[in-house]
């Protein structure tokens, strides 16, 4: 069970509210300038709601046959298909945004700014964009377990609560279980929703080893592995966007000599000679290979992906939202 960071004093409460307010100011400015219109353009038409049934016509998609309505009109059936009814759908004006945010140990790391702060700003930009579109926003915080679940609702107060929870929730777990998070997110909305999976894609494996920045230097590139099937199911049911939170250390080791490092999720310790050029080169190549592998896997599943970092979080998301949405094959 997740817990809030201690806020027993007025100073601590004020500090938390200040952090939330700063995130709101940064992201709302971007949304007001460009993000909301881009958000609506990117996702409009992705949700379809049942309107009514009508008589089947040649050329209609058989997948849309309304078998219940057809059964009630069995006496009208004929060889040419008369008596069959199909469902008509209309575009839903209101969408639901589910923010699935990774709070594992690796998200507390960062070169200048914690990945968790970057994740909060990315989530806030999407949430305030949804708010301006009068959409519902829900929140799933996860590690290797579900830390917090906030059902989708509308309103500024609700969006601020979601941002506050991303910043203030102290997770009980340290590892990452992306597969379980995908399974939970799949069932959060009965209607098709937008699901933003905000994560650094570093996952603790069953053997306790991890495909994160530290473990990868010795164990090689990661793959989607057991996460692929739940991710595929989630992407089929909802409009999935993977927001990958990236830090400079995920790309390249600094030249800092012999460094003692601790994996934030597994607690494993190791000595890494970052002063050795071959070590840094090997790490850099493995990170590059991993990014290409993950990108290829997500492309194969038809999942959109955008990378955010401390250098550019809001800007990267706005560029993504402005791109023309993909045309289904």
Image: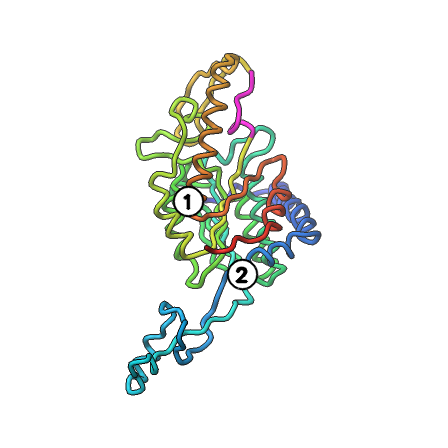
Tag 1 or tag 2, which sits nearer the N-term?
Answer: 2
Question: How far across and how far down the image is residue 21, in percent?
Answer: 65, 47
Residue numbers of the magenta segment: 248-255
Does residue 277 appear left or right of residue 142 in this picture?
Answer: right
Rounded to the nearest whole Å, what is the CA distance between mark 2 and mark 1?
Answer: 29 Å
Question: How far across and how far down the image is residue 247, in percent?
Answer: 55, 32
Q: Is residue 281 above or below residue 191?
A: above
Name the one closer to the observer, 268 or 28: 28
Q: Secondary structure at mark 1?
A: helix
Residue at the spot of label 1:
300
Question: How far across and how far down the image is residue 86, in percent?
Answer: 39, 75
Q: Which mark is residue 234?
A: none
Q: Which quadrant of the figure has residue 79?
A: bottom left
Residue plotted at (46% across, 55% down): 329
Residue at the spot of label 2:
136
Q: Secondary structure at mark 2?
A: strand
Bin the neighbour count of mark 1 within 10 Å (Cα to Cα): few under 14, some 14-19, many 20 and up. few
Image colouring: rainbow
Q: Is residue 90 above or below residue 99?
A: below
Secondary structure mainly formed by the magenta segment: loop
Name the mark nearer the viewer: 2 or 1. Answer: 1
Residue plotted at (53% across, 61% down): 136
């Amino acid at each position: 069970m997740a817990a809030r960071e201690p806020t027993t004093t007025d100073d601590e409460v004020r500090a938390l509210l200040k952090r939330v307010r700063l995130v709101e100011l940064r992201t709302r400015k971007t949304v007001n300038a460009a993000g909301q219109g881009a958000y609506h353009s990117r996702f409009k038409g992705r949700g379809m709601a049942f309107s009514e049934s009508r008589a089947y016509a040649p050329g209609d998609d058989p997948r849309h046959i309304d078998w219940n309505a057809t059964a009630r009109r069995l006496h009208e059936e004929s060889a040419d298909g008369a008596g069959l009814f199909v469902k008509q759908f209309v575009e839903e004006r209101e969408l639901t945004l589910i923010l699935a945010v990774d709070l594992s140990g690796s998200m507390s790391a960062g070169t200048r700014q914690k990945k968790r702060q970057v994740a909060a700003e990315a989530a806030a930009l999407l949430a305030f964009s949804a708010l301006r579109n009068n959409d519902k926003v829900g929140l799933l915080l996860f590690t290797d377990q579900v830390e917090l679940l906030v059902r989708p609702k509308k309103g500024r107060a609700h969006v601020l609560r979601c941002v506050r929870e991303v910043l203030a929730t102290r997770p009980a777990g340290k590892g990452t279980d992306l597969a379980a998070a995908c399974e939970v997110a799949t069932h959060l909305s009965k209607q098709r929703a937008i699901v933003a999976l905000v994560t650094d894609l570093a996952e603790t494996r069953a053997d306790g080893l991890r495909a994160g920045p530290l473990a990868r230097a010795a164990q090689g590139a990661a793959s989607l592995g057991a996460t692929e099937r739940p991710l595929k199911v989630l992407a089929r049911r909802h409009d999935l966007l993977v927001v990958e939170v990236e830090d400079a250390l995920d790309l390249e080791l600094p030249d800092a000599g012999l460094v003692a490092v601790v994996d934030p999720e597994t607690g494993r310790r190791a000595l890494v000679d970052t002063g050795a050029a071959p070590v840094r080169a090997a790490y850099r190549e493995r990170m590059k290979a991993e990014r290409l592998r993950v990108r290829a896997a997500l492309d194969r599943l038809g999942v959109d992906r955008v990378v955010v970092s401390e250098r550019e979080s809001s800007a990267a998301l706005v560029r993504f939202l402005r791109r023309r949405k993909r045309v289904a094959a």
